[in-house]
Image: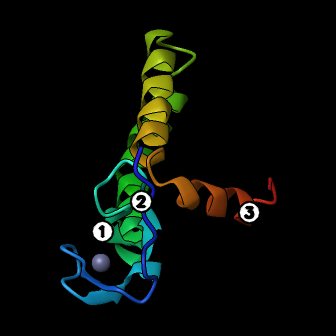
Amino acid sequence: MEMRSYDPNEELRCPGCTELKTRADFYKRSASPDNVSAHCKACVKQERRDWRARVKVQLEWAQRCNHLVPELRERVEALEAELASALAHHEDFIAEMRLARGQA
Ligand SMILES: [Zn+2]
């Protein structure tokens, strides 16, 4: 695989907030052509908060009903797996979250 070095001061436009930001304002994503995720860090965090808020309602409901409907446990696990995979490509984002939780 071709190794490229990227200028951290290079400016990229984020399609989320439409702001021109430096490469350092984006999470690394080795799978993408630019080597960064499409949206800036601020947008990724906001996206995660929105996602969490949506899922939280479903999770709470599912967990409350868990003892009544065993199938819901699978639903909870599926949602948690979905969240994990939604964030899995933000490599340094995951590291940052671990750091924040003291699991580095
Ligand atoms: Zn943005």
* Residue 94 screen position, x and y as percent: 58, 54
Residue at disc 1, CB closer than 8 Å to ligand 1: yes
The answer to whether mark 2 is within 8 Å of ligand 1 is no
Amino acid type, label 3: Leu
Q: Callout 1: 10 Å neighbours few (<14), some, many (20+)?
A: many
Judging by the rendered image, the residue that carries numbered circle 2 is 48
> Who's the residue at 47% across and 16% down the image?
74
Residue bearing the label numbered 3: 99
Residue at far front of view? 2
Q: Examine the image and state in which quarter residue 20 appears.
A: bottom left
Q: Earlier in the sequence, mark 2 or mark 1?
A: 1
Q: Check whether the beta carbons of the residues at disc 2 and disc 3 lie within 8 A of each other.
A: no
Q: Is residue 66 left or right of residue 48?
A: right
Amino acid beneath label 1:
His
Residue type marked 2 = Arg
| Residue at image location 42% in from the left, 43% down from the top | 1
Q: Position of residue 58 (x, y in %)?
A: 39, 39
The picture places residue 70, in percent across and down from the top left corner, at 51, 10
x and y, in percent, of residue 75 in the image: 42, 22
Which numbered disc flags the more N-terminal residue, 1 or 3?
A: 1
> Mark 1 sits on what residue?
39
How far is the residue under mark 1 from the one under mark 3?
A: 21 Å
Instruction: Quarter of the image for the C terminus: give it.
Output: bottom right
Q: Residue furthest top?
A: 70
